[in-house]
């Protein structure tokens, strides 16, 4: 049961992190203060989930999600510093493709199965 909870939390953290912008935009497209507050709340939830997962069993799925999550976070930083964060451009598709490839490699890879 703990392994399933770990996997659900891992997947939830990536989904919340990667869709936080659109969730905030959907609810508060006309109020930047509420938009920012919701976005910060979602980020705080993601951080809480990641800290909580440190106490749960290690699974191959969790490891793959953490790697993908790290790539998405790094890509977000690069996007903010070098590219336009206001529009979805080719680098965003490239980043998503890399995150998916790394997830599949880590999940289906040749490492010993721990969960």
Image (tube, rainbow, N blue to C red):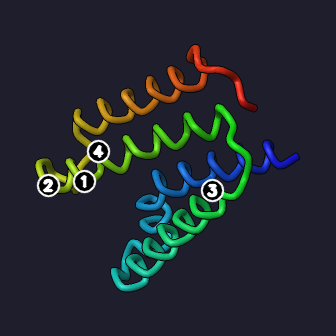
Which of the 4 quarters of the picture holds residue 86? Answer: bottom left
Return the mark for residue 75.
Answer: 4
Question: Residue 27 location, x and y as percent?
Answer: 50, 71
In this rendering, the label closer to the viewer, 2 or 3: 3
Left or right, 83 with reference to 29: left
Residue drawn at 50 percent across, 63 percent down:
23
Q: Quick one: quadrant of the C terminus? A: top right
Between marks 2 and 3, how big is the CA–CA gap?
A: 30 Å
Residue at which label 2 appears: 81
Q: Earlier in the sequence, mark 3 or mark 1?
A: 3
Residue at which label 3 appears: 54
Between marks 2 and 1, how big is the CA–CA gap?
A: 6 Å
Image marks 4 and 1: residues in contact by CB distance under 8 Å = yes
Image marks 2 and 4: residues in contact by CB distance under 8 Å = no
Residue drawn at 42 percent across, 33 percent down:
99
Name, please, the residue furthest toward the bottom.
33
Between marks 3 and 1, how big is the CA–CA gap?
A: 24 Å
In this rendering, the label closer to the viewer, 3 or 1: 3
Left or right, 34 with reference to 47: left
In this rendering, the label closer to the viewer, 3 or 4: 3
- Secondary structure under the numbered disc 4 in the rendered image: helix
Between residue 102 and residue 86, name the one nearer to us.
102
Residue at which label 1 appears: 77
Name, please, the residue furthest toward the left.
82
Between residue 43 and residue 111, name the one nearer to us.
111
Residue drawn at 32 percent across, 35 percent down:
95
- Secondary structure under the numbered disc 3 in the rendered image: loop
Question: Residue 41 location, x and y as percent?
Answer: 50, 76
Between marks 4 and 1, how big is the CA–CA gap?
A: 5 Å
Q: Residues within 10 Å of mark 4 (few under 14, many from 20)?
A: some
Image marks 2 and 1: residues in contact by CB distance under 8 Å = yes
């Amino acid at each position: 049961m703990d392994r399933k909870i770990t996997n659900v939390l891992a997947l939830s953290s990536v989904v919340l992190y990667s869709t936080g912008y659109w969730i905030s935009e959907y609810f508060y497209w006309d109020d930047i203060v509420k938009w920012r507050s919701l976005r910060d709340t979602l980020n705080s939830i993601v951080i809480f989930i990641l800290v909580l997962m440190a106490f749960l069993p290690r699974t191959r799925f969790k490891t793959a999600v953490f790697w993908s999550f790290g790539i998405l976070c790094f890509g977000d930083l690069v996007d903010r510093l070098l590219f336009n964060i206001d529009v979805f451009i080719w680098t965003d598709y490239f980043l998503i493709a890399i995150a998916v490839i790394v997830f599949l490699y880590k999940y289906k890879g040749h490492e010993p199965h721990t969960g």
